[in-house]
Amino acid sequence: MVQQHTVDIGGEMLTYAEELMQEGIMKGMMKGKIEGKIEGKIEGKIEGQVETIESLLSVGAEWAMITAATGITPSQFARLKKQLAQTTTPPSEADQESA
């Protein structure tokens, strides 16, 4: 049985179990925000690399120069483009139903 330890938060009386649950929810939300920021930064970096390489290719730059300047090979570029497409494509209707 949960002991009736109560805490006054914002005018509400919470049991200890409710307090722990609320604390867990807050920690989960913080973790989600941090993970979202990290994913956003990674996605932004990939997008910048792809845009830079596409710009270089559009003006006729050779892959040897692009790789020397960016450290990215043609096969890595293809993977980056694929990864970027996967992160920026909205989920399909089937994906949303399974969530």
Image (cartoon, rainbow, N blue to C red):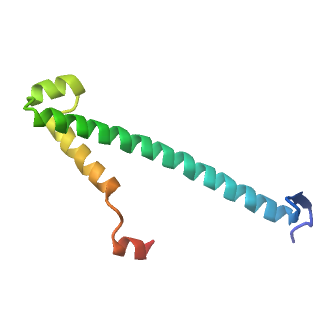
Which residue lies at the image location 23% right of the left edge and 47% below the top edge?
Answer: 81
Q: In this view, does 52 lie above or below 84?
A: above
Quadrant of the drawing holding the N terminus: bottom right
- Find the residue positioned furthest to the front: 59
Quadrant of the drawing holding the C terminus: bottom left
Please state the horizontal and vertical placement of residue 90, each as a whole percent of the image.
Answer: 35, 63
Residue in the foreground of this view, choosing between 18 and 52: 52
**Number of dots carrying numbers:** 0
Q: Is residue 58 above or below residue 94?
A: above
**As drawn, is 40 to the left or to the right of 8?**
left
Please state the horizontal and vertical placement of residue 2, each as a whole percent of the image.
Answer: 87, 68
Q: Quadrant of residue 66?
A: top left
Please state the horizontal and vertical placement of residue 52, each as a whole percent of the image.
Answer: 23, 34
**As drawn, is 39 to the left or to the right of 29?**
left
Which residue lies at the image location 11% right of the left edge and 30% below the top edge?
Answer: 63
**As drawn, is 38 to the left or to the right of 65?**
right
Q: Is residue 46 above or below residue 98?
A: above
Which residue lies at the image location 37% right of the left edge and 41% below the top edge?
Answer: 44
Residue in the foreground of this view, choosing between 1 and 26: 26
Q: In which quarter of the image is residue 98?
A: bottom left
Please state the horizontal and vertical placement of residue 97, each as a whole percent of the image.
Answer: 41, 76
